[in-house]
Image: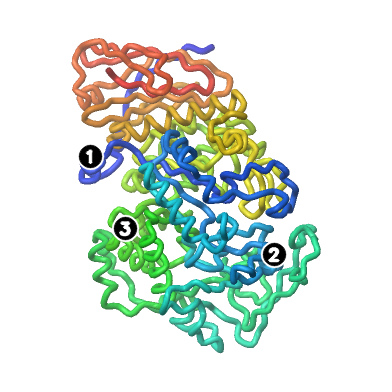
Amino acid sequence: MKKITISILSLLFISCTSDKKESVAENKKGKVVIYQVFTRLFGNANTTNKPWGTIEENGVGKFADFTETALKEIKELGVTHIWYTGVLHHNVIKDYTAYGISNDDPDVVKGRAGSPYAVKDYYNINPDLALEPENRLEEFKDLIKRTHNLGLKVIIDIIPNHIARNYEGKTNPIGVKDFGATDNINVVYDVNNNFYYNPKESFSVPQFKNGYLPLGGEQHPLADFEFYEKPAKWTGNGSRLSQPDFYDWYETVKVNYGIKPDGTKDFEILPSNYKNKDAVVHFKFWKSKKVPNSWNKFKDIALYWLDLGVDGFRYDMAEMVPVEFWSYMNSAIKMKNKDAFLLAEVYTPSLYRDYIHLGKMDYLYDKVQMYDTLKSVMQGKGSVKSIIPIVESLKDIEHHMVHFLENHDEQRIASSEFLGDAEVSKPGMVLSATISTSPTLIYFGQELGEPGAENAGFGTPSRTSIFDYIGVPTYQRWVNNKQFDGGQSTKKEKQLRDFYKRLLNFTINSSALMGAYQEIPIFTKDSEHIFSFARWSNTEKLIIVTNFSTEEIFNLNMELPSSLLKKWSLENNNYVLRDQLYKKDESTLFVKENKASFKVKLKPLQSFVFKVE
């Protein structure tokens, strides 16, 4: 046990937002919390988990599994938005020809259940998810209604960068032509082509590596290492080879947005001052401009789903599509629904501001800075001090940066490749959810410590497979034969979910977390594991202290600066500091002669969210 006296000699004040944004934030009750659920895995109660198992062997979840009870439990976890992943009709290895759906070729499908990011028909729904495949769109509409009835918002994926190599829009609305239907296939590029081509060349299936065979080597009439496509199209990740590499996104083809093969743009460029213009101005700008055909196609797709009741979109690999397109589509979306929720996957920090201000994105992933840094800190490879420059560098856009510790692309926290124990992530989760006004993203099963350890087939352990029919053991225990009550959950799983429930519900109801931020630096040799900061609004003042150490107990004598007391208008008096997570612990803040101090004992992996009362 260590005793540490911390005198705060200087403070780095970082405003979360501009004055204008702060005034808007003050009017909000609390933060946004997004619950990403992999739709086909959510209600699957089948525990067989055979590698490469069929839908009959391993089972699949349905829209109907999201009952009122299930949705109510998700909401009560502290969720405001549900991101239903894998909703759109993508490639699957199951015969649905009885419903007018063509079979998909295993040679260009990853896994047996297929990648949700290889969309086959943008105007319909994955038939696996419906009780009655012919009514799959109606069943999804019913799910939207159930979700809305409980006050939750609905988000789905749109993947503008690429579509399935065997795209087939059989349910297009009247007047909508299929992708590539009007393309000039005799040229590599045309501004109004939907794809890039290698004229006179045929597509070849990649040479499979590392012992991989489609469907794990199972006999299938279409698994013959051939797929007819002539002329060959460029592959989704940008490969121009007619025979892409095994590690390319060979199941998809790249969409052409008017970027010439040499990288130059074949469309109007936004004036630089448009970064300060709102969506209305952007919409007016494009109204008189001629844009590439693909732009209109994806705009129409987004507006179609808005009309069906979807509240927003998560955009896959958004930085692979020009920012001008996003200005065009997102401004059109905002004209139809000014509150539409637009979240983009962007991994290049130098592009963040362009995609927010010019592309009119509401939110971006904070992956390569906050997530990667927190992962390193939680694994004991980095210092909490490395968080400070991240907050500083993003202070002008922090509200737009979504924080997460898990999503479908990242390793499960409880996997041996990440932490091996979800308990170790608790201080990181507290920090991630409270350090800024940004939304918090939770991946289903994260709140139960799911390790993602199953050998599903195409998908690899450490991540719950998005390509296979599989069960999610910790989640199945919570689902408890569709009772959604945690009836089979272990004591540890229940305690972890309780922690998430307490934390997330606090964040969505805290005005301080939508207000100002100030780091509380700790200048001692033992400060590598401790991070502390203040958050406040006009009506709420918080002091948050976290201990990332898995072993050390810290007895802290903390002193706050007079500058913070002045901002908080604290007079000479004694104030109760009451923890808001478990409501069991409290301390006393002694304020006298422009000095403020309090004592706190931090156990390993413990965090306090103290409210000044």
> Residue flagged by tag 2: what amino acid is it?
Phe
How far apart, in angstroms, are the residues tagged by discs 3 and 2? 37 Å
Residue 79 versus residue 569 in the image, above or below: below
Say what secondary structure mark 1 lies in. Answer: loop
Q: Check disc 1: other Cα within 10 Å, few if <14, some if 14-19, many if 20+.
A: few
Please give the residue where the numbered disc 3 appears in the rendered image: 357
Point out residue 30 in the picture as x, y percentages from the top left corner.
Answer: 32, 36
Mark 1 / mark 2, whichever is N-terminal: 1
Circles 1 and 2: CB atoms closer than 8 Å? no
How far apart, in angstroms, are the residues tagged by discs 1 and 3? 22 Å
Point out residue 516 in the picture as x, y percentages from the top left corner.
Answer: 28, 35
Mark 3 / mark 2, whichever is N-terminal: 2
> In percent of the image, x 27 and y 74: which residue is there?
287
Please give the residue where the numbered disc 2 appears in the rendered image: 246
Q: Check disc 2: other Cα within 10 Å, few if <14, some if 14-19, many if 20+.
A: some
How far apart, in angstroms, are the residues tagged by discs 1 and 2? 51 Å
Say what secondary structure mark 3 lies in. Answer: helix
> Residue flagged by tag 3: what amino acid is it?
His
Q: Nearer the viewer, residue 217 or 201?
A: 217
Locate the C terminus by quadrant: top left
> In percent of the image, x 67 and y 36: which residue is there?
416
Please give the residue where the numbered disc 1 appears in the rendered image: 27
Question: Which of the 4 quarters of the picture holds residue 224?
Answer: bottom right
> Residue flagged by tag 1: what amino acid is it?
Asn
Residue 17 located left or right of residue 585: left
Point out residue 91 in the picture as x, y percentages from the top left corner.
Answer: 61, 64
